[in-house]
Image (cartoon, helix red, strand yellow):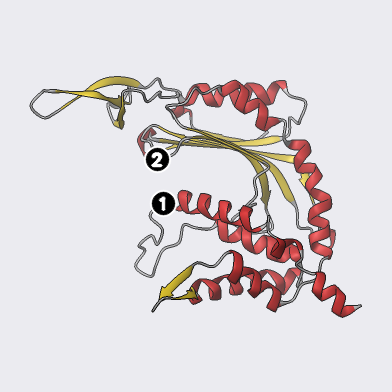
Amino acid sequence: MLDTITHDYDFQVVEEKAYLADGTAIPDMKILRHPDTGFILGRHSSNYKPINYEEMVDNLLVGLNNSDISQDYTTDIKVHNGGRKLKATVLFNDITINPTPALNDITHYRINMFSSHDGTWPYIISADGLRLTCLNGQTFADPLSKIRLKHTSRVSIDDTARHVLNNYETFKDKDHMWSEYAKTRIDTDSVEFFFKNNIVKKKTYSSVRHNNERQLENLMSLYHDHSSWMGHNKWSLYNCLTSWATHTDFTDNSGKRLSKSPHNTSVEREALIAKAMDTTNWHVLGQLYQEVQY
């Protein structure tokens, strides 16, 4: 197994009382501090319960070692912003799906874990698929499993990690569905209709609702990029949607980030896509095309 693990996650957060500049204690507030650097990791209410990164990571790694899922995986565990955030991923090299063998479009099973001490991220652990054909990686917008817990909640690290580890069978079951997507032909008019009615934001001018034309153009362009080599099928549209949800950290010509929180933007888009894929518009995609053909 190949690992990228920076062991700067194995520290115990120091909790301190919060004070005003004049030395007056602030009631019902605490400060979290890094024990080695003294760096302030976050300011929270007194009922905030910090979860040490070491506990989360060790629990996940022990669960992996004790499971019979696979021992052929790559781990990537990194701390960001001086210890304020943690992101950990486990990519399985031998648990894969290839719904389009002719294109060698392989998706790997993956487990993700996020947490923070500054309050920007709750404790999140999820299972999804990572499609490596896309050079900078692409995850799917409908995770197999996703658990989000606030740090004020009663958190069972052991139970949540075990739950996600057990979702690899659900991942394997996706093979048939994705293969059917690849066989389902669609046309651009149907794609545009789906975007307009399920994804594109609406704006109101003079009491009349209008589509966000720039967003629609971006989505259609993204669909054409995928369909140009994957074909006009539901699998191309599915990958278009997941690409849109995954790649949110964009900058303008000056280098200014267009999204204040790429992670939150991605989460919002995932929720929107999951809702769209539960609509009649999604389920009937391709049916009209097939009726015309036959």
For the residue marked with disc 2, what is the amino acid?
Thr
For the residue marked with disc 1, what is the amino acid?
Ser
Q: Quadrant of residue 25?
A: top left
User: Tag on residue 49?
Assistant: none
34 to the left or right of 129: left
Query: Residue 206 or 291: which is nearer the viewer?
Result: 206
83 to the left or right of 292: left
Q: Quadrant of residue 151?
A: top left
Q: Residue furthest front?
A: 207
Residue 231, image x, y percentages: 76, 71
In this rendering, the answer to whether 216 lies above or below 53 is below
In this rendering, the answer to whether 231 lies above or below 147 is below
Q: State how far apart marks 2 and 1 are (Cα).
A: 9 Å
Q: Which residue is mark 2?
A: 120
Query: Residue 166 or 136: which is nearer the viewer?
Result: 166
Callout 2: 10 Å neighbours few (<14), some, many (20+)?
some
